[in-house]
Image (cartoon, coloured by chain):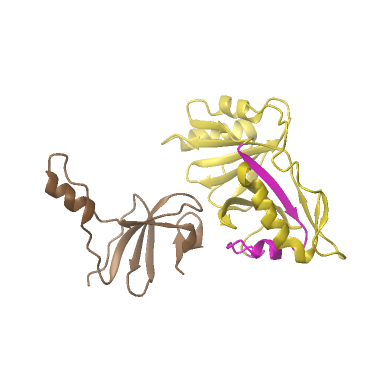
Amino acid sequence: MLRIPCPHCGARDEVEFTYRGDATVARPAPDAGTDAFHDYLYLRRNPRGWQVEWWQHHGGCRAFLKVLRHTVTHEVRGVVTATGALEAPQA
Amino acid sequence: MSAPEPTHPLAAVVRGRHGATGGEPLRVSFPAREIVQVMMRRGQDSAVAAAMRSAFGIDPPGPGQAATGSGASAIWVQPGQWLLTAPRGTQATLAARAEQAFAGLAAVADQSHGRTTIALSGPAARDALARGCRLDLHPSVFGPSRAAQTPIAQIGCLVHQTDATPCFELTVFSTLAEPFLHWLLEAAAPYGVQVA
């Protein structure tokens, strides 16, 4: 069970949140072509290590949050609001 | 607008004592409330704060907080959004007052029929709630005028502590009020519960 410290609500259980995928994926330009949109839609990195992810606090303040989570240990090291900046540490 | 409600969502609930007998029971009641949702428009923070102060005598409460002013309370529910509540049937309807106060500053939606408030009070109220509520309700963390939205028994519930008895006002969608109350009466059964 993850405990995610929501910047608005404080630490809450994972069940209050919905995982919404990799937060570092950038939408291509409108004229980027089908291949770029295919990759944007379907291809994910699936890293072993730190990943910045979208989590929505649907059971609380309903805000979209960026969460820095380790995909092996599940350690949560940082949480910011959707407009905040959060970088995954290298390696 | 809040027309008089012909049937309260919990009108059919059996009143009287449920669960354990003997000792001081928990008390459950269904206060009739007007509930209005206020969603701030972008960048109107200070204007909304001024409007809430002049119309209701309330400084907009921050995350996890609730505040009471002249005849109404405001509960923070999410960034830029509050629920205003007032006892049902006071002067002008709360929605009309809010609509006037926040014209151009916030979207106002009457939720009086959409949400139902259940009040739970008594010394064992924390223990009963803790059987399904993941929030830490210990007095050192959660106290009077604190509020939080959290799922209880898989039903989204706004938990608002109104006094140190402790009394909790639990606001849920009206269509889920009956299953929610069913859970609450089961959770409170070991302590005994009086439904008024």
Whether residue B185 is visible, yes or no, is yes
Residue ID at (54%, 31%): B108
Determine the residue located farthest toward the bottom in the rendered image. Answer: A73
Q: Which image quarter holds the C terminus of chain A?
A: bottom left
User: Horizontally, is A36 left or right of A69 in the view?
Assistant: left
User: Horizontally, is A35 left or right of B109 in the view?
Assistant: left
Q: Is residue B89 above or below residue A8?
A: above
Q: Nearer the viewer, residue B30 or B167?
A: B30
Residue ID at (77%, 62%): B123
Q: Quadrant of residue B22?
A: bottom right
Q: Nearer the viewer, residue B112 or B107?
A: B112
Residue B100 position within the rendered picture, expressed as x and y whole percent measured from the top left:
57, 24
Stretch of the chain drawn in magenta: B114-140
Q: Is residue B195 above or below residue B126?
A: above
Chain B, hue in figure: yellow
Residue B192 position within the rendered picture, expressed as x and y whole percent measured from the top left:
80, 62
Q: Quadrant of residue A68?
A: bottom left
Q: Which chain is brown?
A: A
Q: Nearer the viewer, residue B47 or A26?
A: A26
